[in-house]
Amino acid sequence: MKILMIAPQPFLEERGAPFAIYHHIKVLLSMGHEVDLVTYHLGKEVNLPGLRIFRIPALPGIQQVKVGPSFAKIPLDILVFFLALWQLCRANYDCLHTHEEAGLMGVMLAALFGRKHLYYMHSDLSQQIVSSEFTQNRMLISMVETVQKLIVRQAHGVIAICPDIETTARRMTSKTPIHLIENSAVDESLPPPPETQVAQLRDQLQLAEGPVLLYTGTLESYQGIDLLLQSIPLVQRHYPTARYVLVGGQSEQVRRYSAMAERLGVAAMVRFTGQRQLAEMPAYMALADILLSPRSKGTNTPLKLYTYMRSGKPILATAIFSQTQVLSPESAQLVAATPEGLAEGAIALLQAPEKAKALGENGRLFAEEHYSWRVFVEKSMHVQKEFTAEVLGSAA
């Protein structure tokens, strides 16, 4: 089949949704489908046989797009819609695949051109605008809730990326087929780093010989970075040689949290790296004694957890629903989403290395069974075959 996919994202960029889109495309291509992707002007180039990328024109002043909703996305999404419309006018596509808010575009374009529409539901859009602190306006939130329901009810199939999103989608419709495929296929193809590279990185970050607690991901407010930084003075009393390495975040966010670390008196214990390339991540993971996920709100499972679990390293995470959908007390040190909880969890893992090692191994085994690339491909192929049969059946 020839698929038009619409992704209102920087593609490719080292963060959750673009990663998931990339891996879903890889599965589609492996099945022999062709994919034309309409996306933003931002992101590094991707070369996959069978994939063609159509980018909107660059807009002056928009050099990056933050995670979640933003005013910058409005003009970009308008351009994405018209580029997708143009592609449908000039080429013959068998179906539409859409991601996040492009689901609304998919509803309109599918009706206009008589095509089947598969919607990838990466989040509940109304919850996303609240958890990202974009707005607290009840009228706007209600409007987004209505749009989300429309997308789910009008799509011909929905892929939900975590159990909570699946539950949310099922509450919205009893007719649309809903499929759960966790965004767990991240970086299995990356080779382990040589010891010399890890040692060089340790020297570069001036980590000395103390334990390393690593966070990877965005620095958005819902990630709980403020709670993490506030926990460090408590850990400092017991483990003054411990070092916290925070990988990710835009420059403005790094400056803000660096200033916070200064105010808390823990700047010497914290290293902010900013955004790093995916190829560098194995070296950072190899540095870590403990992996951190201090998320404070939201219900979407953080993509980093699948990578964390596969590493076999012990995980310290807040016991909120977004994380306990994947983690359990047998696979991670789960703590209250407070500075005190994060500090107590870090100290407990550092004081009991055998327990920490067992948690890491339990997580690795669980991920191998439930969240491996093999499992992701099997689930994806099953859903795509069902959807393909529906598309071909409607065309007969």
Image (tube, grey):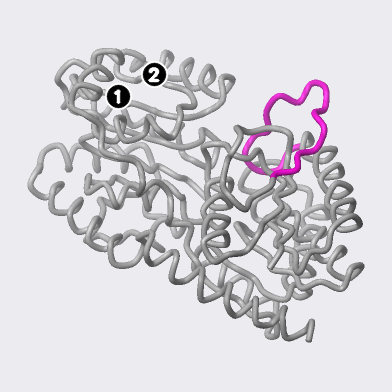
* Residue appearing at x 57%, y 59% in the figure: 29
Q: Quadrant of the N terminus?
A: bottom right
Q: Is residue 206 above or below residue 186?
A: above
Mark 1 residue crowding within 10 angstroms, few (<14) / some (14–19) / many (20+): some
**Residue on which disc 1 sits:** 233
Residue 324 falls in which quadrant of the image? bottom left
What kind of secondary structure does the magenta stretch mostly adopt?
loop
Q: Which stretch is magenta? A: 53-70
Residue 327 falls in which quadrant of the image? bottom left
* Residue appearing at x 82%, y 22% in the figure: 60
* Callout 1 secondary element: helix
* Residue appearing at x 71%, y 53% in the figure: 36
Q: Is residue 132 above or below residue 93?
A: above
Callout 1 amino acid:
Pro
Q: Position of residue 132 (x, y in %)?
A: 63, 43
Mark 2 residue crowding within 10 angstroms, few (<14) / some (14–19) / many (20+): some
* Residue appearing at x 41%, y 19% in the figure: 261
Disc number placed over residue 264 in the picture, else none: 2
Disc number placed over residue 383 in the picture, else none: none
Q: Position of residue 231 (x, y in %)?
A: 33, 32
Q: Position of residue 28 (x, y in %)?
A: 57, 62
Callout 2 amino acid:
Leu
Q: Nearer the viewer, residue 201 or 256?
A: 201
Q: Is residue 1 above or below residue 299?
A: below
Is residue 60 located in the magenta-colored stretch of the structure? yes
Q: Earlier in the sequence, mark 2 or mark 1?
A: 1
Q: Is residue 72 left or right of residue 305?
A: right
Q: Quadrant of the C terminus?
A: bottom right
Q: Position of residue 75 (x, y in %)?
A: 85, 38
- Do labels 2 and 1 touch, CB within 8 Å? yes
* Callout 2 secondary element: helix
